[in-house]
Image (spheres, rainbow, N blue to C red):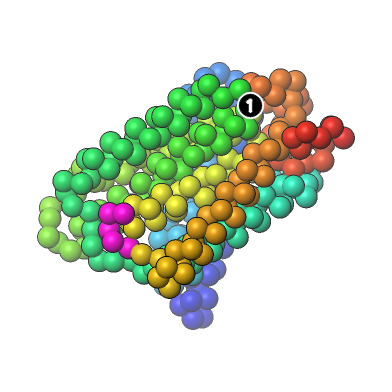
Amino acid sequence: MSSVLLSVLLCLVSAVAYASAAIVQERVAATTPGGPCGPLRRPGWWGAVALTGLGAGLHVVALAYGPLSLVQPLGALTIVFALPMAAVAARRPVGAAGWRGALLATAGLAGLLTLTGPPHAETLDAAQRPALAAVALAGAAVLALGAHWARRAVVRGVALAAAAGAAFGMASVFTKAAAQDWTSHETDFPAFTVLITAVLAATGMLLSQASYRGAGLAAPLATVTTVNPVVAAAVGTAVLGETFRYGVTGGLLAALAGTVATAGVITLSRLTPAGPDRGHPGPAADGTATIPGARRGLTHAGAKPE
């Protein structure tokens, strides 16, 4: 088996693990009463944590066998796998609007990541790391506070998912910095970098869990899947000197890809989970997780329920 084929297989299994974790998180959020700490008492939530760790580990191994330009776009398959898997689990079909939004988000993200240039050997300066960590946590806090004031559950979920994606993206940046520190042997054990990576990853996990509460699966998952690498790419471009391929043309194509991904997220955010009170998060009427795009589970904004 060639190294590229092995990398592709690892990416596929990683995407399935991430998708499974998202489905479990959404179901736990839909059926767990209480505050944001309620899911932590559910074994299923810890199972989602284990699945996320498995997906992350497989993704790292895939990067060791395949090129970044191939591995990173394949990570966008998470949202494509998650929708049919969730539909099978809840015995509800995925509607046309759900598929359209998911495919737009995936295509835009894949295009954006494909256009990202090769990584540089440059790493974060020690003086930059506290400032970047503070900005990342402050940005996540602002988005979380904005979500608190959102009236629609889906809008609240998208805002929380954006905060989670930003936290995960910055965690990836610090993970790369820690790995470079460790392999270069130029510094001692990067304790601060490892600590802030753990804080950002835990913050992203908790925010992503909260984003599914009352918002369904597709819109929060598409938002996390899009914001995560976009934030990492933005830091790479602004701080590490990374660029897009093909110069100005590549930059324009990247802007177009970002627009397509945004359109997909907006399409998914217009899908409203059904329930006795759409303005407040909570489980579906039958106690199961709602699946965005489901024929019986939600309506499109401005459309009548079927």
Residues in magenta, as a range? 238-242
Residue placed at 29% from the left, 66% from the top? 120
Q: Left of 148 or right of it: where is 177?
A: left
Foreground residue among 246 and 290: 246
Q: Is residue 258 above or below residue 22?
A: below
Residue 29 visible from this viewpoint: no
Secondary structure beneath disc 1? loop
Residue at the farthest bottom position: 2
Q: Chief secondary structure of the magenta span?
A: loop
Q: Left of 123 or right of it: where is 225?
A: right
| Residue 264 in picture, x, y percent from top left | 63, 49
Q: Which residue is mark 1?
A: 152
Please identify the quarter of the rendering in which residue 211 is found.
top right
Residue 40 visible from this viewpoint: yes
Please identify the quarter of the rendering in which residue 223 is found.
top right
| Residue 148 in picture, x, y percent from top left | 51, 23
Please identify the quarter of the rendering in which residue 299 is found.
top right
Q: Is residue 78 above or below residue 46?
A: below
Residue placed at 64% from the left, 39% from the top? 269
- Residue type indicated by callout 1: Arg
Q: Left of 304 or right of it: where is 205?
A: left
Number of disc labels: 1
| Residue 25 in picture, x, y percent from top left | 57, 37
Residue placed at 46% from the left, 77% from the top? 3
Residue placed at 52% from the left, 49% from the top? 225
Q: Is residue 68 above or below residue 280?
A: below
Say if the magenta span includes residue 241: yes
